[in-house]
Amino acid sequence: MAKAKTKRGAKAKRAETGHQVKPRRMPKFPPVSEEMKRWSALLGEELRKWPGVTHKPMFGMIGFHRGKKIFAALPATRSLFTPSSIIFRIKPMPAGLLEKVKQEPRFNLEGRNPGAMWWVFEIASDADLSDALWWIGQAYERAK
């Protein structure tokens, strides 16, 4: 009787050869406040009305897609960087928009470079929602 072949991953091969396998560290996803959950719900309610938008849960957030391309994520129970941030994807960031990003204090640019894929926008009050929606709209337009 022939023995069935199985696929073995790199981890198993390294273990056989005696190489140390280091576990991956998952980033800490900070919990969001009830207020941030409300803001996310308001933004998400608007995004669901846009043509071709679908959404699905991801890592404690809700990812928004236009067709097959993800363009934003709003916190549901967890956030990616800070408890009051949303993220959106624009790559490449056009020069004109990049200048606006640099002028905008609500962007978390710590450790970011101009070629970044995901952009982090901080929300501190209801007044920030219209600007957040504008930036998400920019990401939506580029996710064609």
Image: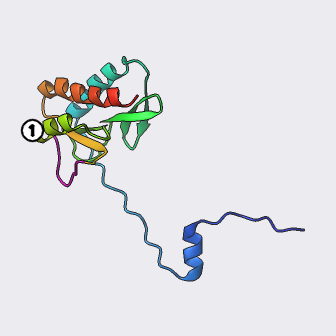
Identify the residue at image location x=24%, y=25%.
133
Position of the C terminus, as image quadrant, is top left
Majority SS type along the magenta span: loop
Position of the N terminus, as image quadrant, is bottom right
Task: Report whether residue 79 is seen.
Answer: no
Magenta stretch in the rendered image: 103-114
Label 1 is placed on what type of residue?
A: Gln
Task: Report whether residue 40 is seen.
Answer: yes
Q: Residue furthest bottom?
A: 18
Helix, strand or loop under label 1: helix
Residue 104 x, y percent position in the rendering? 11, 37
Residue 30, compared with residue 85, is above or below; it is: below
Q: Write down the residue under mark 1.
A: 103
Residue 54, compared with residue 86, is above or below; it is: above
Residue 112, compared with residue 66, is above or below; it is: below
Residue 133, compared with residue 11, is above or below; it is: above
